[in-house]
Amino acid sequence: MAKKEKKGGIWSFAQGEIISADGYRRHSVWIVFLVALPIIYMCFKFDIQVKLDNIVKLNNQLNNARTDMIHVSSKYGSMTRESEMVKMIDSLHLNLKATEQPPYYLDK
């Protein structure tokens, strides 16, 4: 009896051997690996895109907070000017007067 020779490559593909149940059984580990690899890649890519969107959103919030800080700082600076303080004292009718001479220090 002659031994049946196994031909690989294009001939086995043409015979449909590669898509037979036996072919799936022999290559099941590789098939699962090749299907799982793109799924894992897409999951990681989606996770990275979500994190990048979060970083952009946080950067926008940080820029807005910096702008608000500068605005409040300039408003505070204008409120603490001597002329503004004098106007505020006059408008509140506290019977206070601004001093004309600078402060002096007592000896310790």
Image: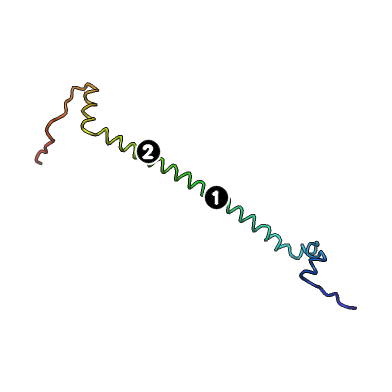
Is the residue 67 above or below the residue 52 in the image? Answer: above
Q: Quadrant for the C terminus, please.
A: top left
Please tell me which residue lies in front, 22 or 107. 22
Location of residue 18 (image quadrant):
bottom right
Q: Is residue 68 left or right of residue 27?
A: left
Are circles 1 and 2 on residues that touch, CB within 8 Å? Answer: no
Amino acid type, label 1: Gln
Neighbourhood count class around disc 2 (C-alpha, 10 Å): few under 14, some 14–19, many 20 upward: few
Q: Amino acid at mark 2?
A: Asp
Pinpoint residue 65: horizontal percent, then vertical percent: 39, 40
Q: Nearer the viewer, residue 15 or 31?
A: 15
Image colouring = rainbow
Q: Residue at x 66, y 57 (%)?
A: 36
At x 90% / y 78%, what residue is drawn? 1
Q: Which mark is residue 49?
A: 1
At label 1, counting other C-alpha atoms closer than 10 Å, the crowd grade (few under 14, some 14-19, many 20 or more) is: few
**Quadrant in which residue 97 is drawn:** top left
Q: Secondary structure at mark 1?
A: helix
Q: Is residue 4 left or right of residue 27?
A: right
Of pointers 1 and 2, the one earlier in the residue sequence: 1
The residue at which mark 2 appears reads as 68
Res 72 label = none
The Cα atoms of the two marked residues, 1 and 2, are separated by 29 Å
Left-right relation of 4 to 80: right
* Image spot of residue 57 (x, y percent): 48, 44
Number of numbered discs overlaid on the protein picture? 2
Give residue 27's quadrant in the image. bottom right
